[in-house]
Image: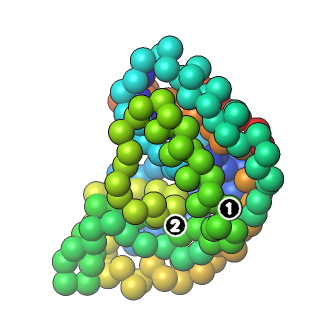
Amino acid sequence: MRIFIGVDLPEALKSDIFQLEQKIQEQSYKGNWKPADSFHITLRFLGEIEETEVKSIAEGLRSEIKGFKPFSLNLKGGGTFDAKGEEQSNIRVLWLGVDGDLKALNRLYFQTECVLDALCYPRDHREYTPHITLGQSIKLKGGLNTLAPYFKTLNSSFEVTAVTIFISEVVSGKRSYRPIERIEF
């Protein structure tokens, strides 16, 4: 099973993000765009693990976050990982930024890492950059700066009340993310 841990988003917010994504698609020549049901904030990607390990991870998370309080986040701007070209029009990953109670989100990330450390999963040493992926392998018609007005249209806040374990699987030739365990605060 290909697994990751993240924060699922409310359906109405996923719909708003999808509408934004469609507007951005009109400003691109190509891209691998995410479907609305796949929008989330990743806390930790685990990759391939055994199905039996999911129970241990869920139990560890349940124990570690039981005293956690719900907190608010909102969307803020956009960014890229590995944008290239004269105007940064070739983009490996295009994402929406996250703002709000980042202290709580970073604490949730840290507690997730603690659970995984205790279960002997190797640590991810990259800096944690919370975001919502819109698409990958994108070729824009204009430069990255042409997208700034689109990112300003989303001013959605949402409450984080749980951590979700997702399975990442290929369905009908497309990568799909399905929640398999939701751990409420």
Q: Residue at x 38, y 45 (%)?
A: 123
Is residue 30 something that shows in the picture? Answer: no
Residue 28 appears left or right of 158: left
Observer-nearest residue: 119 or 167?
119
Residue 29 sits in quarter: bottom left
Work out which quarter of the rendered image holds the C terminus and state it.
top right
The amino acid sitting under disc 2 is Leu
Crowding at dot 1, Cα within 10 Å, few <14 / some 14-19 / many 20+, comes out as some
Q: What residue is pinned by disc 2?
A: 96
Q: Residue at x 57, y 22 (%)?
A: 56
Residue 96, image x, y percentages = 52, 66
Residue 171 sits in quarter: top left
User: Outermost residue, front direction?
Assistant: 118
Q: Secondary structure at mark 1?
A: helix
Above or below — where is 84 with respect to 40? below
Q: Residue at x 46, y 49 (%)?
A: 34
The amino acid sitting under disc 1 is Ala
Q: What residue is pinned by disc 1?
A: 104
Residue 99, image x, y percentages = 63, 72
Q: Secondary structure at mark 2?
A: strand
* Residues tagged 2 and 1 counted as in contact (Cβ below 8 A): no
Above or below — where is 52 with respect to 120? above
Colour convention of the picture: rainbow
Observer-nearest residue: 141 or 81?
81
- Label annotation for residue 155: none
Q: Which numbered disc, 2 or 1, marks the residue closer to the eye?
A: 1
Residue 167 appears left or right of 154: left
| Marks 2 and 1, the one that precedes in the sequence | 2
Observer-nearest residue: 167 or 94?
167
Give me the C-alpha separation between circle 2 and circle 1.
19 Å
Work out which quarter of the rendered image holds the N terminus and state it.
top left
